[in-house]
């Protein structure tokens, strides 16, 4: 099965959109970078099905699948969590850290992929599901969805999968309408909305992967596909129709963009290498940028004479550089070491599909 390099670059564009949202360079009141989370979920479902459907059908065990997924996700997850803890403790020592609750409880719950319990939140706190590293609410859901996919894989035939996707699709519309947006799910009290978001998008990604040879979309150059991903997430949308725009993006546009991304691949070897690096660094950027946001906010509060946007741009560039460095010099060696230590190749297993999440 061929490697889908354009999907790597699409993931990188979406991760950058999330980062510029959190750094305050764009605002969710005028555009929709938060929908990148739904795009990630759909892309993850597609790539998981693309990479593992055949192997799970051929007898790969649930334990082996989950071990592979943990090796793929956990090194950067743990690094971002430790970085968030250090920045939070530093901020609290300086008197301006997050006051969501005991930092070690925040750390312990996230370490085992659980949202921060509301019972531990301090009075008046925002009750973030992942206070140490805000975007981790979606990574927690991602890991849980991987477990669910492995357990129920044998029952997820096309009929059942289509029905479940349709039901979650109704849930997406209901949430968007009731909340006037899909920018929800990141608080402990709204975490159930996040479950609906990943339930639809991840399983829709699996569905379109399995239907990809029957579905036809206009063939676009990979540059056009990347531009469309950024354009959809940054498109200015009136507040009155935001729930409609969000629903259409998640239910229709993102699946079509993923299909389009499978049809056009770069041919130049240097571009291919760049896309692979962008795909790898995208997860590092998503996992590590929020503690840098917290540092930037502390620095900006101590230097109010300097425009906040200048700090935002500087720390955004720092986050991108850190993401590439973490991917190349930490994530790759860590996963290689974990694979050598814990993985044993199965002779009966089909060749691994190279696409990765």
Image (spheres, rainbow, N blue to C red):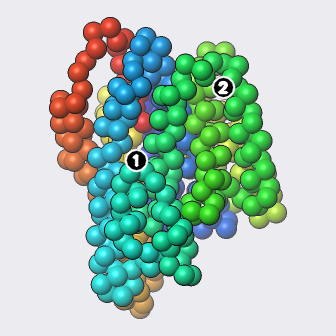
Q: Position of residue 227 (x, y in %)?
A: 56, 44
The residue at the far top in this view is: 348
Which quarter of the image is occupied by the N terminus? top left
Above or below residue 357? Residue 88 is: below
Sequence-wise first label, 1 or 2: 2
**Residue 254 seen in render:** no
User: Between 85 and 260, which is closer to the camera in this rendering?
Assistant: 85
Q: Specify whether 177 is left or right of 354.
A: right
Q: Position of residue 4 (x, y in %)?
A: 45, 27
Q: Position of residue 229 (x, y in %)?
A: 58, 45
- Say which residue appears at 80% left-offset and 55% top-offset: 177
User: Between 103 and 142, which is closer to the camera in this rendering?
Assistant: 103
Tag on residue 282?
A: 1
The residue at the far bottom in this view is: 305
| Residue 261 found in image quarter | top right
Above or below residue 92? Residue 340 is: above
Tag on residue 161?
A: 2
Labels in figure, total: 2
Q: CA distance from mark 1 to mark 2?
A: 29 Å
């Amino acid at each position: 099965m061929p490697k889908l390099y354009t999907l790597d670059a699409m993931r990188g564009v979406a991760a950058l959109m999330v980062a510029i949202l959190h750094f305050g360079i764009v605002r969710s009141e005028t555009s929709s970078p938060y929908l990148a989370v739904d795009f990630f979920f759909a892309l993850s479902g597609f790539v998981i099905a693309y990479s593992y459907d055949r192997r799970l059908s051929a007898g790969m065990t649930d334990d082996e699948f989950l071990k592979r997924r943990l090796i793929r996700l956990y090194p950067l997850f743990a690094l971002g969590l430790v970085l968030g803890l250090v920045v939070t403790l530093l901020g609290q020592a300086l008197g301006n850290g997050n006051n969501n609750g005991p930092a070690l409880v925040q750390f312990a719950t996230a370490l085992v992929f659980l949202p921060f319990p509301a019972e531990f939140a301090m009075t008046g706190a925002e009750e973030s599901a992942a206070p140490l590293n805000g975007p981790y609410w979606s990574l927690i859901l991602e890991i849980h969805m991987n477990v669910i996919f492995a357990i129920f894989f044998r029952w997820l035939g096309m009929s059942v999968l289509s029905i479940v996707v349709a039901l979650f699709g109704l849930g997406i519309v209901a949430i968007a309408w009731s909340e006037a947006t899909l920018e929800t799910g990141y608080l402990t009290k709204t975490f159930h909305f996040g479950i609906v978001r990943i339930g639809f998008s991840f399983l829709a990604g699996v569905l379109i992967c399995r239907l990809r040879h029957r579905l036809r979309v206009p063939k676009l150059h990979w540059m056009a596909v990347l531009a469309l991903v950024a354009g959809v997430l940054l498109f200015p949308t009136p507040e009155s129709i935001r729930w409609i725009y969000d629903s259409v993006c998640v239910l229709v546009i993102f699946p079509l963009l993923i299909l389009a991304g499978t049809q056009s691949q770069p041919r130049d070897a240097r571009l291919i290498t760049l896309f692979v690096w962008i795909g790898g660094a995208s997860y590092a950027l998503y996992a590590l940028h929020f503690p840098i946001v917290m540092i930037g906010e502390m620095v900006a509060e101590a230097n109010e004479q300097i425009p906040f946007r200048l700090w935002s741009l500087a720390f955004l560039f720092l986050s991108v550089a850190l993401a590439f460095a973490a991917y190349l010099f930490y994530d790759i060696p860590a996963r290689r070491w974990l694979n050598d230590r814990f993985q044993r190749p199965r002779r009966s297993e089909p060749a691994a599909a190279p696409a990765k999440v």
